[in-house]
Image: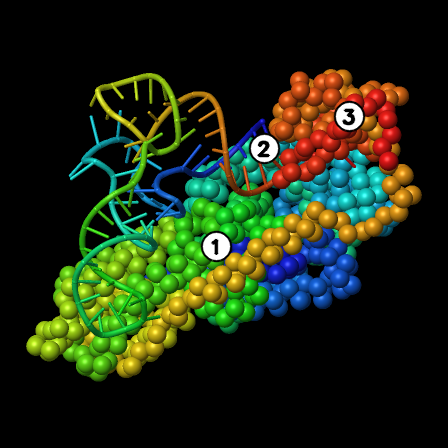
Amino acid sequence: MKLVTCGLPYANGKAHIGHLRTYIPADVYVRYLRMLGEDVIFVCGSDCHGTPIVVNAEKEGMTPKEFVEKYHEHFKNVLKAVGVDFDFYGKTAEEYHHEMTREIVRRMIDGGYIYPAEVELAYCTRCDRFLPDRYVEGICPYCGAMARGDECDQGCGKHLEPGEIKDPRCKICGNPASFRKQKHYFFKLTAFKEFLTQYLENLKATENALNYAKEWVKNLRDWCITRDLEWGVRFPGDERFVVYVWVDAPIGYISFTKKACENRCDWEAIWKRGEAEIIHFIGLDIVYHHCIFWPAMLKAANFSLPTAIVASGMVKVEGKTFSKSRGYVVWVEEDYLKQGFNPDYLRYYILSYTSHQKDLNFSWRIFKDKVNNELLATFGNFLYRVLHFSWKNFGEVEMEVDDEVIVKIKETREKIIDALNKWEFKMVCDAFMELAAFGNSYFQSEKPWDLIKQDKNAARKVISNSLQLAKALMIFAYPVMPESMKKVAKALELDLTSCSLDDAAKIDEKMKVRKPDLPFEKIDEKVIESLERMMENRFKEAEKKVETKEEEIGLEDFKKLDIRVGRVLKAEKVQKSKKLLKLEVDVGNEVRQIVAGIAENYEPEELVGKSVVVLVNIKPTRIMGLESRGMLLAADVDGKAVLLMPERDVEAGTKIK
RNA sequence: GCCGAGGUAGCCUAGCUGGUGAGGGCGACAGACUCAUAAUCUGUAGGUCGCGGGUUCAAAUCCCGCCCUCGGCACCA
């Protein structure tokens, strides 16, 4: 038995093409396994807890429960629409999941792996709440640089536990946060170093994930697993707290398995007795949670361990790094499904573009090319020309298939299985595309349309071979393009849902052929052009939003700014930094140290003696451990600074108005 | 800056425990065909295998240095 899971989508926004990069390959993988006779359970669900959800729900005037429900429904519907067919799609806000989480955490406590420790936590008196992780900004206690959330330490790569950060400020309202001591609970991750090192040695995983994790395991620290929040799973050791999201989210794999197993199988066989393979499909961004925290938790609770971790590469949009705020995003529902595109096209694109481990570029133009040239012209056209010819000239064909054809089909089957074992889905697609090309070439060279005029029996043999190839292709491509293949298979009265991969090489005595449907529809150039325009507008609008702050201010606001001309006296590079220069600037009444992110455009030497424009009364801060008192004004050109300078020589300290 | 993954023709990719002229697909170009959604088939062109050193009889493949891209962290007051 095998269990396949997908990383849980966070119920905090809409489904985009990045999500599908793990769900679609996982779905395809599961469908192939089933066609190989494997018993597979396939589960997923919405991740519902954590501070961002609480904060965003508040912003939208909803309760976290309502908020989460909204996105949960969205994901459920979208995934179904693209043919990702889970046995169970749950959500972590449900009671059954809370129970499971509490059971596992209790086992971790009973095993002696959880201990209390006092930590100092940032608390925002204005927002009236404790500030977890990513809502705290401050100074790293190790190196003195600006730090954010639970990670910092400027280049030394250390991990911050709650309470360690200095000078914390609330990221929500910007106010300084005060420290409050609070008892929290820690998981003894450090006790698992040896176990994890061993475990990673033997874990089956894509290389991108494994190397990353092996490096991480060298530097383990105990892990604070409680949070002071209302929303979440109550920590069984101390009911005032809630468990950290990354504790309860992966436990969803277990609680969803249990639901999927109801009246069908034994979830404990999978998760407690190690009688099944457990395969996690995830994105590259959550590798360490799945390769470090998760196996350690399972070990502590005495549960079964994952046997494989399959991590997918990132998604780019039109060649640019995926970014919602910059508009480089493709929304599955409104951009794709509402255009009326066949979901199978997207499935094929995602599977066949590149190796599962590498970055995938989504471009509407490439999308059109792949659909029109590969799917439609090569693959679909072979199916259609064979079926159409058979239907028109025979109706029913007595089958007589050459060994060469059967060998070719079996070879393709082997290639597909081989590729699946390596999680190389592009190779799977390449294998059946090659078989389609073989079919076209065969059909073309045998010229059945000529043969039939002279020797109907000879034509029958050619058609018999071609039909066998067509049937094999439908079976082989069914997991990738289920709906389209079902549609064409109707012409052969073939029920793909009950086929195995072995059936591809099985020869029927006779094959009946009905009038076929076209398997695919061509994508119109004009549609692509309009989508490209839509994307461009989206990029532009996103850019505008970032650049122009609409809010108007009065003169009195402007007067609050003390802006002066300053003269640069000294300039040097900040060590270990790409963008920073440390300057000493004469601002009239004093000389100030200012750290500025301008090193990409300016050499230190060329600045000495130059006049610059300085915002003097900005709050002093520390950057890379250095104090900075003032800010140089500069034009932001593609993220690089171009300094403002007075048009003629002006004395240092001159006010700007 | 640290960690990880990569850089092979316009695009995607195989090869990378060193050894037949660096394979394949898409696109481009030319010809053939007409059963088929102007689909298909055959052929042609296109590569300093990121750059520079080194090891070797022999390197895309091993070693050293550098550059660039992507991701994570950090950072850009």
The residue shown at (72%, 52%) is: A51
Q: Position of residue A567 (x, y in %)?
A: 78, 21
Q: Chain of mark 3?
A: A
State the quadrant of the C terminus of chain A: top right
Kind of residue indicated by mark 1? Ser
Q: Chain of mark 2?
A: A
Q: Residues within 10 Å of mark 3 (few under 14, many from 20)?
A: few
Q: Residue furthest front?
A: A648
> Does A638 sit left or right of A485 as displayed?
right
To the question of a shared chain for discs 2 and 3, the answer is: yes
Q: Position of residue A507 (x, y in %)?
A: 20, 71
Q: Position of residue A192 (x, y in %)?
A: 57, 38
- Is A203 in front, or is A21? A21
Q: CA distance from mark 2 to mark 1?
A: 40 Å
Q: Residue furthest right?
A: A556
Q: Which residue is mark 3?
A: A648
Q: Which residue is mark 2?
A: A219
Q: In what element is the residue under mark 3?
A: loop
The dot on residue A363 is 1
> Does B66 sit left or right of A144 as displayed?
left
